[in-house]
Image (tube, rainbow, N blue to C red):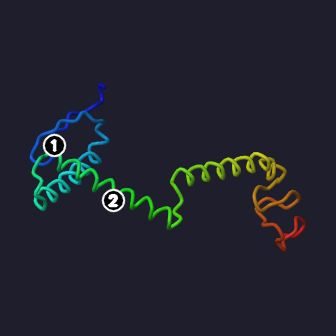
């Protein structure tokens, strides 16, 4: 993958190298910080010192937090982003269709917007000035 960038990070004191798209670097660094923080916390607070075991415990802790957030989102009745995007697309399509149906409205107006056919150009519709008055 030619556009990828090599990024080296440290998690629990161990170096790891990732090949990622440049636009994903910030998200990777944020995830690395979260994992490193979780592993450091678990390692310092538990009798378990094996890196693999600490990593598994950190993964379970992070997964548990994620699942709790998903449950809360469902309980709160939050609308998924995909559903919002689909609804916006649908409304845009309906608006476009309405604009196509009524595109001819306004083309029969001689003086432009606010000047219906028969009103002198430059006189607002309903103006007390008639074409015969000066």
The front one of 55 and 31 is 55
- Residue 20's quadrant in the figure? top left
- As helix, strand or loop, the secondary structure at mark 1 comes to strand
The answer to whether residue 73 is above or below residue 94 is: below
Is 103 situated left or right of 75 in this image?
Answer: right
- As helix, strand or loop, the secondary structure at mark 2 comes to helix
- Residue 2's quadrant in the figure? top left
Q: Residue at x 20, y 33 (%)?
A: 6
Residue 22 point in image, percent of width and height: 28, 38
Where does label 1 land, which residue?
9
Where does label 2 land, which residue?
65
Residue 94 point in image, percent of width and height: 71, 50
Q: Residue at x 50, y 67 (%)?
A: 76
- Residue positioned most to the front: 47
Is 47 situated left or right of 134 in this image?
Answer: left
The front one of 134 and 24 is 24
Measured Cα–Cα span from mark 1 to mark 2: 23 Å
Residue 32 point in image, percent of width and height: 22, 48
């Amino acid at each position: 993958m030619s556009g990828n960038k090599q990024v080296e990070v440290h998690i629990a004191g161990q170096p790891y190298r990732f090949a990622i798209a440049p636009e994903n670097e910030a998200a990777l660094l944020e995830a690395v910080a979260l994992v490193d923080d979780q592993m450091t916390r678990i390692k310092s607070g538990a009798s378990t010192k094996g890196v693999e075991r600490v990593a598994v415990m950190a993964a379970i802790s992070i997964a548990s937090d994620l699942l709790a957030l998903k449950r809360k989102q469902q309980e709160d009745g939050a609308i998924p982003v995909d559903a919002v995007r689909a609804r916006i697309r649908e409304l845009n399509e309906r608006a476009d269709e309405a604009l196509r149906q009524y595109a001819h409205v306004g083309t029969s107006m001689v003086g432009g917007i606010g000047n219906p056919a028969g009103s002198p150009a430059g006189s607002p519709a309903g103006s007390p000035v008639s074409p015969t008055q000066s």
